[in-house]
Image: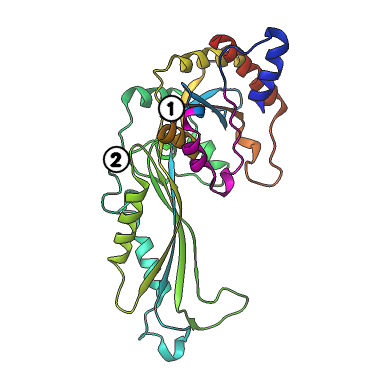
Amino acid sequence: MTFLEALRAWMPVHGDLPCRLTIFLEGEEENGSPSLIPYLQENADELRCDLAMICDTGLFKDTAPAIVTMLRGLLGEEMTIHAANKDLHSGMYGGAAQNPIRVLSRILAGLHDATGRIAISHFYDGVRELPDAIRSQWQALAFDHAHFLGDVGLSVPAGEQDRTPLEMIWSRPTAEINGIWGGYIGDGFKTVLPAEAHAKLSFRLVGDQDPHAIRQHFRAWVEAQLPADCTIEWKGHGNSPAGVMSIDNPTFEAARAALGEEWGRAAAYVGCGGSIPIAGYFKTYLGMDAMLLGFGRDDDQIHSPNEKYDLECFHKGIRSWARLLEKLA
């Protein structure tokens, strides 16, 4: 909305847009954007531009503007390990029958080694080392990881031990267990020996990691550890590659200048630990890079009850886009 409002305010003053613009509104992101890729493929010639500008990120701090140049990709997996053909009584079968929860727990406990590295073979294929210049710039941001973790009741970074907290959340891949369940989980107590166990996992990907290859490597890694009498059922939950933007395009420096004028401090080039798949799709299907600007704050409670968007950020966001349009002119 900040970009649309900037255009609305621009037209009465200038009478015409500063350059050719294509407005693309996409409202399916939260359910996987099933229509997006076919639409991009069918309309590529009409949609292709010099640069995509995406407004779906936030400030680095409450008043510190930022331009995202690095996005992590995403891969989702759901797994069910089957053992007996029905739930069993642990008094009759316990000790003799395979317990799929125990099997699943043992496998997932080995997902990371003692240093925080992910133990799947070939998982790090395609991971790029962070350039020294970018690492120095991130260090200059003076990121307070103690405050970052303290806000959610934590204190110690739990990722790869030889990486800084910003690297952990912006430029390194992850493997996270999002849910694990099985057996009897209702009120009270039952001595059940379950027939199956379930887990859901997500992988954040970086650099040139191939989501399809990661899926294959993960499944092979799990299946190689299955004992006798156990089988596994898989369900994939979508995938998207990581995105690394080229900042050689002069529009990036124009954006830094525009943001600096509006916010009174230099804009930083930053990473984003989340995934915005459309940026990668623009690159894959339209051959164009993306620049990501946004004006949200850390306390906006995105995807939570009482989500909000600060009015000051909304108005300054409008003016930021208007300043950038002026520089593009």
Vertical relation: 274 (above or below) 98: above
Q: Residue 125, labelled with which disc?
A: none
| Disc 1 element | loop
Q: What residue range appears in magenta?
A: 22-45
Query: Which residue was labeled with disc 1?
Result: 288
Residue placed furthest toward the bottom: 92
Residue 327: x, y in percent? 55, 10
Residue 32: x, y in percent? 53, 48
Q: What residue type is labelled 2?
A: Gly
Q: Residues within 10 Å of mark 1 (few under 14, many from 20)?
A: some
Looking at the image, tell me whether mark 1 or mark 2 is earlier in sequence order. Answer: 2
| Disc 2 element | loop
Query: Which residue was labeled with disc 2?
Result: 126
Q: Which residue is nearer to you in this view: 318 or 265?
A: 318
Q: Which residue is nearer to you in this view: 78 or 284?
A: 284
In space, the residues marked 1 and 2 are separated at their CA atoms by 21 Å
Q: Quadrant of residue 139?
A: top left
Query: Residue at 57% across / 33% down in the picture?
Result: 56
